[in-house]
Amino acid sequence: MPRRRLILAALPSLSILLFIFFVLFNIHVKSPRVSSLNNTITPREKPPSQVQFSILVGILTRPDKYDKRHFLRLVYGIQSSPIASIDVKFIFCNLTKDEQRIFIALEILRFNDIIILNCSENMNSGKTYTYFSSLPRVLSQRYDYVMKADDDVFIRLPQLALSLEPLPRLDLYYGFVIPCASMNPFVDYMSGMGFLLSWDLVEWIGNSYIPGNDTYGPEDKLVGRWLNTGDKAKNRFSNKPAMYDYPGTNGRCSHELIPETVAVHRLKRWDQWLHVLNFFNVTRELKLTNLYSID
Ligand SMILES: *[C@@H]1O[C@H](CO)[C@@H](O)[C@H](O)[C@H]1NC(C)=O
Ligand SMILES: *[C@@H]1O[C@H](CO)[C@@H](O)[C@H](O)[C@H]1NC(C)=O
Ligand SMILES: *[C@@H]1O[C@H](CO)[C@@H](O)[C@H](O)[C@H]1NC(C)=O
Ligand SMILES: *[C@@H]1O[C@H](CO)[C@@H](O)[C@H](O)[C@H]1NC(C)=O
Ligand SMILES: *[C@@H]1O[C@H](CO)[C@@H](O)[C@H](O)[C@H]1NC(C)=O
């Protein structure tokens, strides 16, 4: 009898122990990139879950580009950064066809990565303004940085995060400064391939009369003009040569692929995507199993 009571008394502590083991095990399983063979974290690597900031990458595209979204979900879905939490979302204006209301509803149900703005699809007529100015109102959370990207750019998310780590979290305008050969981010503007603003500037765009009165024209150029007119973005960073146009597609904005790349733009053809994915070893982590053979 006493022994049985002892066992019963021990049960709660046993379940607490089990719970602790469960938690530990779970954390271990989920921690990113702990070198499993070794279990030592190399000094350069930060301990897991050291997320320091957040980024929203909004890819401005059109509702009908279903295949492109499917592909980009693969490209971005396999990337992550240990130092930043990064959400990639597809941004379009109002749907215009009945079929879109079903097909895109399906995508939203499955992926929840679409934002539909109150505007009509028409390049250079204010979509970028609507994008930035709507975000504080439509999002349920703030981000440290918001990026606007094209759907023909390949962004390496870990490298993007690393390049932002040492930069200010406020009043920042980041990208690839135009003209192509310029190295001065305080003159002109960042290319529409992919530029990024800190959250305070996103809020400013929504609140200031300056952008609100100046929404028609090439969208990337407009953003530079708003910031200059408003005397904003004291912190600017043009990430050359890490951002560029695909070799041979755009004069001095193009150069050969380089290992330290953050973004390659003007990927219009499959052979260009193939070249880029291959060069950056994007599929290198594919594991050997009995289920397939890809050589
Ligand atoms: C484990 O780490 C040590 C020292 O950092 C290194 O010499 C060794 O090669 C590593 N082993 C594996 C299997 O990665
Ligand atoms: C959407 O935009 C239209 C036209 O600009 C405007 O009349 C309408 O009030 C807007 N709707 C919302 C919910 O903001
Ligand atoms: C977008 O669609 C909403 C809902 O159907 C409508 O109220 C709004 O006026 C539309 N906006 C534009 C700019 O067409
Ligand atoms: C445009 O600017 C005027 C003042 O110059 C201001 O009253 C108005 O609200 C602005 N419009 C928008 C859409 O911000
Ligand atoms: C891709 O992998 C190859 C072979 O391991 C290596 O030489 C090359 O540096 C890698 N490229 C990049 C961009 O990491």
Image (cartoon, grey):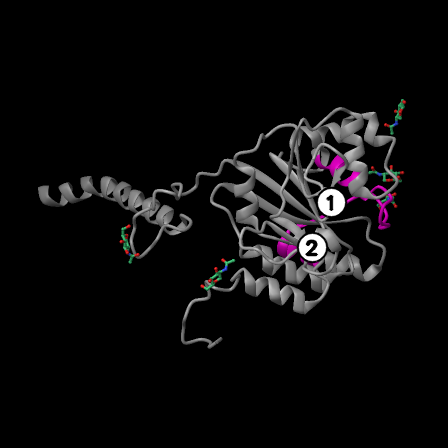
Type of amino acid under label 1: Ser
Q: Residue at x 67, y 38 (%)?
A: 139
The residue range painted magenta reads: 106-135
Q: Are there few (<14), some (14-19), or many (20+) residues within 10 Å of tag 2?
A: some
Q: Quadrant of residue 16?
A: top left
Q: Residue at x 48, y 41 (%)?
A: 83
The answer to whether residue 186 is seen in the rendering is yes
Q: Earlier in the sequence, mark 2 or mark 1?
A: 1
User: Where does residue 194 sit, x and y in percent of width and height?
Assistant: 69, 46
The residue that disc 2 covers is 254
User: Where does residue 259 sit, x and y in percent of width and height?
Assistant: 53, 55
Report the residue that reaches farthest toward the left. Answer: 2
242 w.r.t. 237: above or below: below
**Does dot 2 land on a helix, a strand or a loop?**
loop
Q: Are there few (<14), some (14-19), or many (20+) residues within 10 Å of tag 1?
A: many
User: Where does residue 239 sit, x and y in percent of width and height?
Assistant: 62, 42
Left or right for 87, reference 187: left
Left or right for 31, reference 242: left
Q: Quadrant of ligand 2?
A: top right
Type of amino acid under label 2: Ser
Left or right for 265, reference 80: right
Q: How many marks?
A: 2
Judge whether residue 225 is colored magenta: no
The residue that disc 1 covers is 191
Q: Residue at x 25, y 40 (%)?
A: 12
219 w.r.t. 283: above or below: above
Judge whether residue 117 is colored magenta: yes
User: Where does residue 71 sit, x and y in percent of width and height?
Assistant: 65, 62
Q: CA distance from mark 2 to mark 1?
A: 13 Å
